[in-house]
Amino acid sequence: MTTYAPENDAIIEFDRVEKTFPGHRAVENLDFTISRGELVSVVGVTGCGKSTMFNLTLGLFAPTRGTVQVQGHDPYTEFDWFRRKVAVVFQDARLLPWRTALQNVCVGMKFAGIEKERWEPVARDWLERLGLAGRENSYPHQLSGGQRQRVSLARAFAVDPELILCDESFSALDEITAKALRAEFVELVRAGNKTGVVITHNIAEALSLGNRVLVMRPPGHLADDVHLDPDATQEDVDALRQRVLRAMDPGGGDTVVGTPSAKASSA
Ligand SMILES: Nc1ncnc2c1ncn2[C@@H]1O[C@H](COP(=O)(O)OP(=O)(O)OP(=O)(O)O)[C@@H](O)[C@H]1O
């Protein structure tokens, strides 16, 4: 009989990872696993190593010590294996200004190695799902910041990746637009059975987005791993906010009140 073991369903595994740049240790003893289907937020003070963790996951550089695995593969040495499997959405949409919304999504599919016949129908479908039907032929400068970010999300989902990494993707938007886009993002990740990891400086966003919050602290290690309960009350969420703040900044003093909710647990 096959026994379900979450670690067999790991999408991202960091095993005692260290990353040192000349004269600076950005990540130290970073150890965590993210399983298929999870939607995880990553928070931590500036410079604590969040982007370095993302860049290690993307295989942009190798760890100095320890191992990073994405779906059981080394993202640095097996870089080509990851085309189509991982998509990234940044804080700024990073669209090609001389290409329309449709063409920008198609370019993403082209770089991912997807067959040419599929580019246009799939791109149109994702633009429509993200509320941009009728704007396919608009250039980035003709779109609002929120619409540009919708194109960027369409470009990410169109390659049908297993894993979507968001680096402060909602931070540059006003809170109302960000809230709407976050909700759509969560729905699309869930509906597509994807795994999502979102770096954010917004603790409320981290606590509302997914099932788990990883809290990092300099130099680049895990300070807390908070699992979220979808039925949490406002009181639970307030307690979790304090727990996250305390983990980010243990010397924060009077920002810390209350105790972690019984509805949340460390992994
Ligand atoms: N290529 C690099 N060369 C040298 N130092 C680096 C490099 N990349 C990152 N660092 C350093 O590593 C530390 C962690 O940086 P990182 O960008 O991962 O932090 P972060 O948590 O993402 O910060 P922020 O929230 O401000 O984006 C910082 O002190 C940074 O200066």
Image: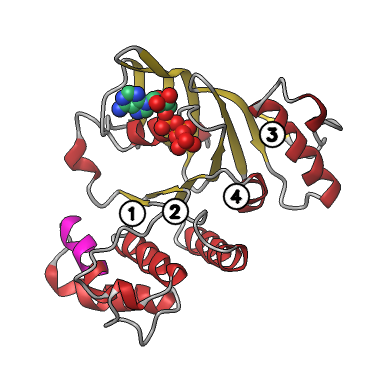
Circles 2 and 1 in contact, beta carbons < 8 Å = yes
Tag 4, which secondary structure? loop
Disc 3 versus disc 2: nearer the observer: 3
Q: Is residue 227 visible?
A: yes
Residue range (magenta): 105-113
> Ligand 1 closer than 8 Å to the CB at disc 2?
no
Residue lying at the far left in this picture: please name it: 116
Q: Which residue is mark 1?
A: 161
Can you tell which quarter of the image residue 179 is in? Answer: bottom right
Q: CA distance from mark 3 to mark 2?
A: 25 Å
Circles 4 and 1 in contact, beta carbons < 8 Å = no
Q: Which residue is mark 4?
A: 210
Kindly identify the amino acid type of the residue bearing the numbered disc 4. Gly
Q: CA distance from mark 4 to mark 1?
A: 18 Å
Question: Residue 64: image x %, image y %?
Answer: 31, 15
Q: CA distance from mark 4 to mark 2?
A: 12 Å
Residue 90, placed above or below residue 260:
below
Residue 138, placed above or below residue 112:
below
Kindly identify the amino acid type of the residue bearing the numbered disc 1. Pro
Q: Which residue is mark 3?
A: 244
Circles 4 and 3 in contact, beta carbons < 8 Å = no
Disc 3 versus disc 1: nearer the observer: 3
Q: Quadrant of ligand 1?
A: top left
Circle number at residue 102: none
Residue lying at the far front in this picture: please name it: 141
